[in-house]
């Protein structure tokens, strides 16, 4: 995060909108009320001047046929003369179903054909669905690459949302991140389904990996039950092992509560980073540098790249930020050594200190 103070202010603004929705949702009885009370303040929190027609244009023409009154999308956010974000609004109480998405898809196709607009949002003021053309160029995907409810927004969603701020908006970076979000979401939903109720294809795949027996219906049904029980056992073992490792860390691994306190201090471009504990300072510094930049350095510790896009197959401590996993299983001197190594490789001139050195 480039400026933690700005992010905290942004987070507070979003939380205030969420609280307002909880208190006034019964008053939003038409679409205009929904826009005025919930949707426009949301985009204002993202840093867009909702009263500037050069930046937020209402009823933006989105139609291939120019010889008649065009269809219009509710709002279009502009950068210069080009649309960067289309917003279709619905009544607060309206479910965001396929019919609503199909309407936005038509607007998207018209705008992307003429102005290269790449992102669209469907919202009822509480639910936000983000779309792009990841499957086929210039045609909006049928499924959103990301969605959230503002009244139940998670920390990870808040950080994803921050990249849509006016000052942070970068089409290439958002597109790349959108791909990761989409496929991570699809994989999560698929595996969640297999955890609860393995299907025939998944059972056949597993059977083919562990046995050369013929894939009969009887064997497949038996295996489905085995898979479900095995998944539950794996989860239980992981939780128990994690709790055991955590207890051992606090006692034997020289990674104590005192060492994880805010003893690590990093100065980056005259900005001081010092969180309540050194783990957060370590992760916050890597986030400020850029998770992908650090991952590409392939700095390995304890046998793993310290930044990964996949869950490390290890019981070492780690933190998840956005779509990245950062290994944090080291004491403060090692944290300092790693950050200094990153600084040297990227010529960042970081100043990394420990309080005990002072």
Image: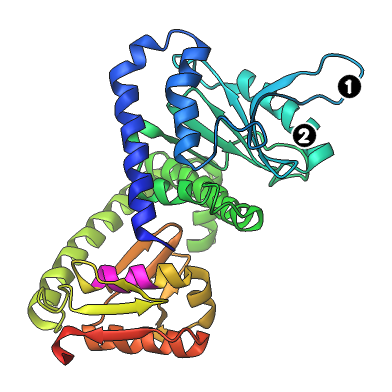
Q: From this viewpoint, is residue 311 visible?
A: no
Residue 40 visible at all: yes
Q: Residue furthest front?
A: 52
> Which residue is located at x 53 percent, y 42 percent?
200
**Circle 2 crowding by C-alpha within 10 Å: few under 14, some 14–19, many from 20:** many
Q: Main structural element of the magenta stretch: helix, strand or loop? A: helix
The image quarter containing residue 122 is top right
In the rendering, at what x and y percent does residue 281 appear?
28, 71
Q: Magenta stretch containing residue 284, yes or no?
A: yes
Which quadrant does the C terminus fall into?
bottom left
For this orientation, the residue located farthest to the top is 29
The spot of residue 118 in percent (x, y) is 70, 43
Position of 326 compared to 55: left or right?
Answer: left
- Which residue is labeled 2 in the image? 111
Check if mark 2's residue and mark 1's residue have beta carbons within 8 Å: no
The x and y percentages for residue 265 are 26, 78
- The dot on residue 65 is 1
Q: Does the magenta stretch include residue 150?
A: no
Marks 2/1: CA–CA distance: 12 Å
Rendered position, 348 above or below 34:
below
Q: State which region is magenta.
A: 279-285
Q: In this view, does 147 lie to the left or right of 122?
A: left
Report the disc number at residue 247: none
The correct choice, above or below, for 90 with respect to 39 in the image is above
């Amino acid at each position: 995060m480039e400026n933690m103070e700005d992010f905290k202010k942004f987070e507070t603004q979003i939380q205030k909108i969420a609280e307002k929705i909880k208190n006034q949702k019964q008053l939003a009885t038409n679409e205009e009320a929904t826009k005025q009370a919930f949707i426009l303040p949301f985009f204002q929190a993202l840093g867009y001047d909702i009263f500037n027609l050069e930046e937020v244009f209402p009823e933006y023409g989105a139609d291939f046929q120019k010889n008649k009154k065009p269809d219009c999308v509710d709002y279009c956010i502009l950068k210069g003369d080009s649309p960067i974000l289309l917003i279709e609004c619905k009544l607060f109480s309206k479910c965001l179903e396929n019919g609503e998405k199909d309407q936005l898809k038509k607007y998207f196709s018209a705008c992307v054909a003429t102005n290269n607009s790449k992102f669209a949002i469907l919202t009822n003021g509480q639910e936000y669905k983000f779309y792009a053309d990841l499957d086929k160029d210039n045609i909006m995907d049928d499924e959103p690459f990301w969605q959230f409810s503002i009244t139940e927004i998670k920390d990870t969603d808040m950080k994803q949302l921050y990249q849509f701020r006016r000052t942070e908006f970068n089409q290439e970076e958002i597109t790349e991140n959108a791909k990761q979000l989409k496929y991570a979401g699809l994989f999560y939903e698929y595996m969640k389904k297999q955890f609860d109720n393995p299907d025939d294809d998944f059972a056949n795949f597993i059977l083919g990996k562990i046995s050369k027996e013929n894939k009969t219906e009887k064997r497949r049904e038996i295996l489905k039950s085995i898979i479900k029980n095995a998944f539950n056992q794996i989860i239980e073992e992981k939780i128990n092992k994690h709790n055991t490792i955590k207890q051992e860390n606090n006692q034997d691994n020289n990674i104590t509560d005192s060492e994880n306190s805010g003893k690590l201090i990093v100065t980056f471009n005259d900005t001081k980073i010092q969180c309540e504990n050194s783990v957060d300072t370590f992760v916050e510094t890597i986030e400020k540098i850029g998770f992908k930049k650090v991952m590409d350095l392939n700095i390995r510790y304890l046998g793993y790249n310290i930044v990964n896009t996949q869950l490390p197959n290890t019981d070492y401590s780690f933190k998840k930020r956005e779509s990245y996993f950062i290994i944090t299983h080291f004491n403060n001197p090692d944290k300092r050594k790693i950050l200094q190594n990153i600084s040297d490789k990227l010529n960042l001139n970081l100043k990394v200190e420990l309080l005990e050195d002072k």
